[in-house]
Amino acid sequence: MIIVSKHFFHKNYVGLSLWPFIILREVALKKDEVLINHERIHLRQQEELLILPFYFLYFFEWLVRTIWYFNGYTAYQNMSFEREAYANEDDLDYIEKRASYAFIKYLWG
C-alpha cells in the first residue's frame, strides 16, 4: 500500500518503506517505477528479517557506518540494505528472482 505524506522526509529523501507501507513525499512519485521498486526491495528485506529485526539491524549498521565514515549520509549510502536496493532498483523483475538474504553480499565491498 502506498501512502503520500510530506511529514516523514528530511532533505532530499522522497520515499521510505515501513512495513507494509511505502510512503512517498509527493503523489507524482507513484508513477516512478524505479523508486517503487527500490522501496519494494526494502519491504522484502523487512519481511525476510521478520520486520522488527530489520529495523534493529538497519539502525545498527547505520550507526556503525556513521562512526566509521564520520558522516550519516555516507553511512546511509554504504549500508548493505541500501546498496542492494540501489544496485537493483532498475531491474523491475528483481524481486521475483532475488535470493533470500541477498543484502548480505553487500555488507562488504
Image (cartoon, rainbow, N blue to C red):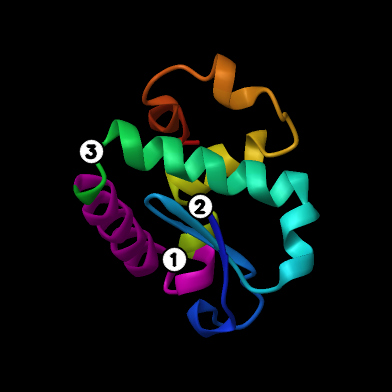
Under mark 1, the amino acid is: Tyr
Question: What residue is disc 1 on?
Answer: 69
Residue 39 numbered tag: none
Under mark 3, the amino acid is: Leu
Viewer-side label of 1, 3: 3
Question: What residue is disc 2 on?
Answer: 78
Under mark 2, the amino acid is: Asn
Question: What residue is disc 3 on?
Answer: 50
Label 1 secondary element: helix
The correct choice, above or below, for 81 with respect to 13 in the image is: above
**Label located before the other in sequence (3 or 2):** 3
User: Residue 46, position in %: x, y?
Assistant: 35, 42
User: Residue 34, position in %: x, y?
Assistant: 74, 45
What span is in magenta? 53-74
Residue 64 among magenta residues: yes
Most foreground residue, 103 or 65 = 103
- How far apart in space, not on screen, are marks 1 and 2 (Cα)? 10 Å
Instruction: Identify the residue at horizontal 52%, vertical 70% (top origin).
Output: 73
Horizontal side, residue 3 vs residue 14: left or right: left
Viewer-side label of 1, 2: 2
Label 2 secondary element: loop
- How far apart in space, not on screen, are marks 3 and 2 (Cα)? 22 Å
Circles 1 and 2 in contact, beta carbons < 8 Å: yes
Horizontal side, residue 56 vs residue 68: left or right: left
Residue 43's image quarter?
top left
